[in-house]
Amino acid sequence: MAWHLALDVDRGSRVPLALQVRDSVRRLVEDGTLRAGTRLPSSRQLAADLGVSRSVVVEAYEQLTAEGYLVTRRGSGTSVAEDGVGLTPVSSALTAAAATSVSAPVDGDGGEAAWDLRTGTSNLLAFPRQEWIRCVTVALGSAGHRELSYSPPAGVPLTRHILAGYLGRVRGVRTRSEDLMITSGFAQGLALLCHVLGDRGHRTLAVEDPGHPGEREFIASARIRPVGIPVDAEGIRVDLLEQSGARAVLTTPGHQFPTGACLSRARREQLISWARAVDGYVIEDDYDNAYRSRSDQPSALQSLAPDRVVYAGSASKVLAPALRLGWLAAPSELMASLEHVRAGWDIGCSGLEQLAFARFIDTGGLDRHQRRLRAEFAGRREVVRREVARQLPGTRVLGGDGGLQAYLELPPAVDEDALIRSARGRSVLIRGGRFHTLTDTGRPPALVLSYATVGCEGLARGIAELGVAYRRLLPGAEEGDAPPVPG
Ligand SMILES: Cc1ncc(COP(=O)(O)O)c(C=O)c1O
């Protein structure tokens, strides 16, 4: 194997080359650049790459081996010795980085548990690998010079064309491919929007309360202050938004995150009137529309006012966050600014991935996949409703008509934090309403239960464990006492 190693050697220096190679490798090991276990090139290969005689490298390697920096094994060549001190294995470093992504905020516990009911991902086991591989193969096999080169920062024209048609068909989104931008997930779309809004003088962005804490952090890091607007059974309280002074709002009208409320028709009209009155914008995060339980639910809010609403979607919930595929359909005048900023950021995301996605949509793969998952999640929702009624008496299940999470409103006397701690002790990871709250602290205690990654059987068992913890906390229960499941 022709491993490569980047080393500095100075042929003009008086220091012998063998010493330079030795010192350079030693420095890289000591400062952690070369991690324990890293394979190094053979002495023949490295000598050829550096343009020095092989004996130079042999001498350096021998000395570093004698000093304990390197090990040489017959058949597997030379590698950095496994002293392990202060070095993080590559796999755990990657996991930690992933856990701190914007879309999936961590709450200090990434530990193993039998039932992980926290939101943040989808049913990744169902990822349509074979179909996706076929799409990637076709995209790559047919890619010519143009496809392998840079595409416009807003995305591959074919993908935007196909996606615009798809969004019109499934969500009633009214857009043209020129007004659609492919982003690296919704996270990047939100960052771009914050930047453009900031340039236009916005200092605040209204957000739903409760809402997504990772998004709030993201907005704040773009130097825009998120202002919480309470949510009720009809969605965001537009009357309070009107008093907030903000001129832009981030909202999840299809299925409010995390309460699951669907923005009522009256509020939709009111929200659009507000945006017009303040000469502002509504950012519609349509993150989990794929899992709407009925097709007669309202179309995207954007369809009411394409000149005031930026529609945002993502492949993270329906396919996988790893694709980092998202999209924005924006009013034309805003799109021009978004494109300008984007061109200075990353010049667009992977064209090949976008082409594979276009084919996946165009061949009906996305519709088929969604249909399969919709049926699966409808079954899981039923289990959640039934088991919560059995195991957590007195709890109301909200937001149960679609999506990937249910909002469990607990009786006022239940201590939310104590319940979460106690559930963790029973191997159930779950977050509370408070985790999602910005300032609206008057809400009853709650749990946000995701059924994205746990199947029906696991859900029933996890909720049973949660039920034990819950019944121990009910007023009147003795220490260590779990009142029996009713019925
Ligand atoms: C409310 C909400 N919006 C959007 C997203 C998608 O974000 P991204 O496309 O950056 O993965 C998520 C993902 O967890 C989400 O929870």
Image (tube, rainbow, N blue to C red):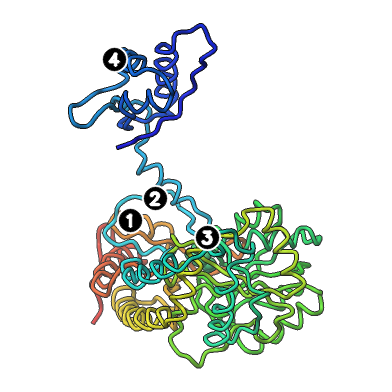
Tell me which numbered mark, 2 or 3, is placed earlier along the sequence: 2
Reading the image, the residue beneath label 3 is 148
Q: Which mark is residue 424?
A: 1
Q: Which quadrant of the rendered structure holds the C terminus?
A: bottom left
Closer to the observer: label 4 or label 1?
Answer: 4
Looking at the picture, which amino acid does disc 1 mark?
Answer: Arg
- Secondary structure under tag 1 reads helix
Mark 1, Cα crowd under 10 Å, few <14 / some 14-19 / many 20+, is: many
- Placement of 122 over or under 417, stated as above or below: below
Q: Earlier in the sequence, mark 4 or mark 1?
A: 4
Q: CA distance from mark 2 to mark 3?
A: 41 Å
Q: Is mark 2 within 8 Å of ligand 1?
A: no
Q: What is the distance, in whole Å, between disc 2 and disc 1 at their CAs? A: 10 Å
Work out how far the residue at label 4 is from the one at label 3, CA to CA, in angstroms.
45 Å
Numbered disc in front, either 3 or 1:
3
Q: CA distance from mark 4 to mark 2?
A: 45 Å
The amino acid type found where label 3 is placed reads: Leu
Q: Element under label 3?
A: helix
The answer to whether mark 2 and mark 1 are in CB contact below 8 A is yes
- Residue contact between numbered discs 3 and 1, judged by CB atoms under 8 Å: no
The residue at which mark 4 appears reads as: 62
Residue 165 is situated, as x and y percent measured from the top left of the image, at 56, 83
Q: Amino acid at mark 2?
A: Asp
Q: Nearer the viewer, mark 2 or mark 3?
A: 3
- The residue at the point 74 percent across, 80 percent down is 307
Q: Which residue in the structure is indicated by mark 2? A: 109
Residue 177, label in figure: none
